[in-house]
Amino acid sequence: MSGASMLALNAFDPDGAAALDPVERALVERRAAVFGGAVPLFYDRPLNIVRAEGVWLYDHENRRYLDAYNNVPVVGHCHPHVVQAIATQAARLNTHTRYLSEVVIGYAERLLATFPAPLARVLFTTTGTEGIDLALRLSRVRTGRSGVIVTRFAYHGHSVAAAEITPAFGSGVGLGAHVRTVAAPVAGARPEDVGPAFARAVAQAIADLERQGTPLGALVLDSVLSSDGLFVDPPGYLAEAVAQARAAGGLFVADEVQPGFGRTGAGMWGFTRHGLVPDIVVMGKPMGNGMPIGAVVTHADILADFAARTGYFNTFGGNTVSCAAAAAVLDVIEGEGLIASAQKVGAHLKAGFTQLQAGLPCIGAVRGAGLYVAVDLVQRDDPAAPDTALARRLINGLRERQILISTCGPAGNVLKIRPPLPFSTANADQLLQATGELLAGSA
């Protein structure tokens, strides 16, 4: 998988279209005619999804699929409270932030209340990509520096600036000359070694940027290193690396698009597991349960520096309908106890995979925090060697059993399990049973 793009993981091969049923084949052909080859489909047999509810997706023949993958509908697909908030606000007003709005200001106040001091200012965007782009602008204004450090298979977005710090796109999308990458922790490393090793790698990257004459402006980290394969433990291991970055004059930008909104089961934000307060936080995807809204949260003085040079306006960022949806998401997270549920169900899921690991040599490390769990699939005769082919067979086997997951990591051998937060222990057991049976059958 070296040099490959994360977009190629699990992608449908168009040569397999002839084996699809007539409805699916026709849609694949029509899709190819309008999108070309730029937008991949998932699975060997793509899904034609027509509706959803909670943790379930339904196809055109009303077959039900357990969604163990999609983090965007964080409170569940089509949650009635969120749907009603969208409909009510859309029928009343949908406009931008140049007008006063209780809906927008009230949501901003609620959102900021979930952050530790001094994270006290917010700017709304429509996506996480826009948020990363804006965070890079803020950091350059604040520090006067453009150097950026990210992890080796990180994904941070699709704009030019974001793609330049997204090595997960593979060799076809070059990193910026101002960007350096550091490896994620080694699976199975001793807990006491993880933080110091990661900090040493960051220090080396800082030194390399300085030798080039491009000193560090921002260390940009997803606090669970999602695309690298999910590295969450021990809690606190990122702190030493962040201290290195700040000592060198850089800011810590926390990309919370994937770990945020209770995903880790240890509070609202992933960075809190590491005892950190970032300089800038970026969020998106789950924020509106599918509505287009993202945000950048930062310190008052960092935003003041930026505002002194330029204003900020985003036509759709912070529109009233998206803010109403996002406020409803907070209602559901709080009202249904979804953070505590993520911790409980995630621990059950991780323990279940650890039990499977004992009897299946193809399962390597099992990692997880809340409802974000990763399982390494490895060669049975060489536990250090990833088994990418087995991972692909498994996710497609699960798809045939109407359970949806994906993979991640540079080798594409890491099972990526990241369901909506209403996922239950019964849902987890369904996934565990099917996975165990498929892996046992592949021996």
Image (cartoon, rainbow, N blue to C red):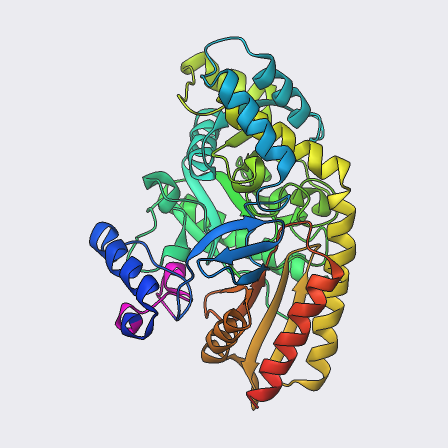
Q: Is residue 11 magenta?
A: yes
Q: Residue at x 52, y 63 (%)?
A: 63
Give the residues in magenta.
2-16
Nearest to the observer: residue 343 or residue 165: 343
Q: Residue at x 58, y 46 (%)?
A: 77
Q: Quadrant of the C terminus?
A: bottom right
The quadrant where residue 366 appears = bottom right
Q: Is residue 436 magenta?
A: no
**Rendered location of residue 59, percent (x, y):** 47, 58
Is 11 located above or below residue 115 in the figure? below
Q: Residue at x 34, y 63 (%)?
A: 24
The quadrant where residue 181 appears = bottom left
**Rendered location of residue 343, percent (x, y):** 76, 53
The quadrant where residue 44 appears = bottom left
Nearest to the observer: residue 163 or residue 16: 16
Given the current orientation, which residue lies at the most extreme top position? 100
